Amino acid sequence: MNVNCLSCGHSLDLREAYDHYRGQIRCFICGALLTLHSEDGQVISVVLSQSGREGVVSAPERTG
């Protein structure tokens, strides 16, 4: 079973392990957290739960 990440569009190959699944998965590329519901190998719903990059703060630039 394949699911496209709702954040970056990457195709996630979940194989048979997720044919009957209700829970969260993380995108391997962008780190977005998705909530997946699947039954009989078919995707029922996918919702973007949160961005995997939330809370990342860049250090301020130093001025000389």
Image: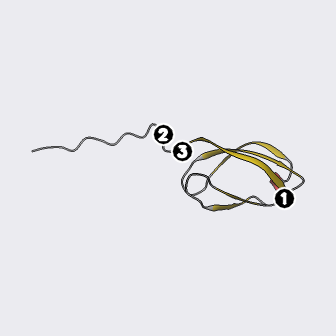
Q: Pointer 1 and pointer 3: residues touching (CB < 8 Å)?
A: no
Is 7 in front, or is 62? 7
Q: Farthest right residue?
A: 40
Which mark, residue 52?
3
For the N terminus, the image quarter is: bottom right
Q: CA distance from mark 3 to mark 2?
A: 6 Å
Q: Earlier in the sequence, mark 1 or mark 3?
A: 1
Query: SS for tag 1?
Result: helix
Q: Amino acid at mark 3?
A: Gly
Q: How many marks?
A: 3
Pointers 3 and 2 in contact (C-beta within 8 Å): yes
Q: Residues within 10 Å of mark 1 (few under 14, many from 20)?
A: few
Percent x, y of residue 41: 86, 56
In the rendered structure, the answer to whether residue 34 lies left or right of residue 18 reads left
Residue, x 56% and y 52% (percent of image)? 7
Depth check: give the residue in front, 36 or 15.
Answer: 36
Please give the residue where the numbered disc 2 appears in the rendered image.
54
- Answer above or below: position of 55 versus 19: above
Marks 1 and 3 sit apart, C-alpha to C-alpha, by 25 Å
The residue most toward the left is 64
Residue 57 position (above or below residue 28): above
Residue 13: x and y, percent? Answer: 72, 62
Looking at the rendered structure, the secondary structure element under dot 3 is loop
Q: Identify the residue position indicated by label 1 in the image.
A: 16
Percent coordinates x, y for residue 26 in the rendering? 64, 48
Question: Which coloring applies here?
Answer: secondary structure
Location of the C terminus (image quadrant) = top left
Query: Callout 2: helix, strand or loop?
Result: loop
Q: Quadrant of residue 11?
A: bottom right
Could you classify mark 3 by the number of other residues whose Cα lies within 10 Å: few (under 14), some (14-19), or many (20 or more)?
A: some
Sort mark 2 into few (<14), some (14-19) or many (20+) by Cα contacts within 10 Å. Answer: few
